[in-house]
Image (cartoon, grey):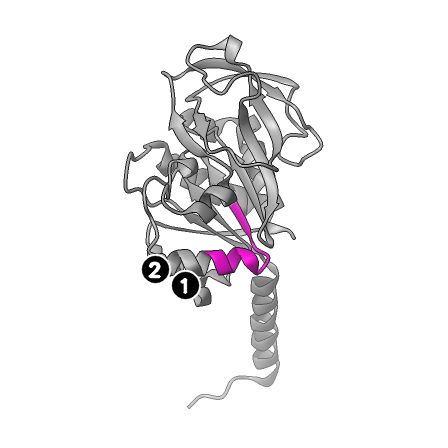
Amino acid sequence: MKKINRPIGILLFALALVSFIETKRTPHILVYAKTKGFHHKSIAVGLTAIQKLGLENNFAVDTTTDSSYFVPKTLKKYAAVVFLSTTGNVLTDEQQAAFEQYIRSGHGFVGVHAATDTEYDWPWYNQLVGAYFQSHPKQQEAMLQVVNNNHMATQHLPRSWKRFDEWYNFKSIQPGLNTLITIDEKSYTGGTNGEVHPMAWYHDFDGGRSFYTALGHTDESYSDPLFLKHLLGGIIYAMNP
C-alpha cells in the first residue's frame, strides 16, 4: 500500500476536521411537503426557494415527503421543521409522538400556507400551528396590515402591504398567539374572521417555537423578495431558541 506523504496526510486530516466542524456548526432544517389532500403546485418552487435561502444564509436544507423522517434519531438532526403546504393526515400516531417530543426538546416549527389544512384530528398540532383552515375565497388582491414590525419576519415590511394571494379563513384559532400580520377584510371579498383576521403569527409552545404564515399559495410568492424575507425571518426565529 502506498504511504501518504506526512505533510499531505496532516493537510488532509486538517481539511477533514474543518469540514466536520463546519458541518456541526451549520444548522439544518427539514422541509416536509407531504400531501394527503389538495396538492399545491407551488410546493415545487417553494422547496427550491427555501433551499436557496439556506445557501444564502448559512443553513442546510433537507426536503422530503417521506414521513419516516419523523423518528427521534432523525429529527434530532434538525433545528427546525417546516411544513410546506402539507394537507391531510401526514403522520402516523407514532410519528406524531416523535414530533411532539422533538418540539418539547426545544426545537422549532414553521408552517406555510396549507400547514393549517393538516392533521385535523390531532389537537396538539392545532395548538402548535395556531389555527385550522376553514375556507378561502377566490385568489385576489388584498391589503395586509403589519401589526408588529419588531419581529425578524416583519421588520422589513411596509405597515400596509398590498399583495395577491389566496386568503385563508380560519377556525379553532388558539389563544396566546403573537399576531404579526392581519388582513383587512374590507379590502377584498370573502373574509369571514372579522375585524381581527390574522395572517401570520408566532408563539412559544410546549418547550419549542412555532411560526406560521398563511401566505405562499402562488408560485409568484417564492420569487417575491418581501415574502421570501418574511419566510426567512420565520425560519430563523424557529431555528434559534
For badge 1, the amino acid type reads: Val
Quarter where residue 98 is shown: bottom left
- Element marked by disc 2: helix
Which residue is farthest right?
Answer: 150
Q: Specify the segment rendered in magenta.
A: 100-109
Q: Which residue is mark 1?
A: 71
Residue at horizontal 58 percent and vertical 65 percent from the top: 24
Quarter where residue 15 is shown: bottom right
Which residue is farthest bottom?
Answer: 1
Image location (x, y in percent) of residue 99: 45, 56
Image location (x, y in percent) of residue 166: 41, 22
Q: Nearer the viewer, residue 10 or 133?
A: 133
Query: Is residue 78 visible to the viewer in this orientation of the structure?
Result: no
Quadrant location of the N terminus?
A: bottom left
Q: Nearer the viewer, residue 201 or 141?
A: 201
Image location (x, y in percent) of residue 159: 66, 19
* Contact, mark 1 vs mark 2 (Cβ under 8 Å): yes
Distance of mark 1 from mark 2, alpha carbons? Answer: 7 Å
Quarter where residue 104 is shown: bottom right
* Label 1 crowd (10 A; few <14 / some 14-19 / many >=20): some
Residue 158 forms part of the magenta stretch = no
Q: Which mark is residue 68?
A: 2
Residue 106 forms part of the magenta stretch = yes
* Label 2 crowd (10 A; few <14 / some 14-19 / many >=20): few
Residue at horizontal 33 percent and vertical 48 percent from the top: 90
Q: Horizontally, is 46 left or right of 235 in the view? A: left
Image location (x, y in percent) of residue 63: 40, 50
Q: Which mark is residue 115?
A: none
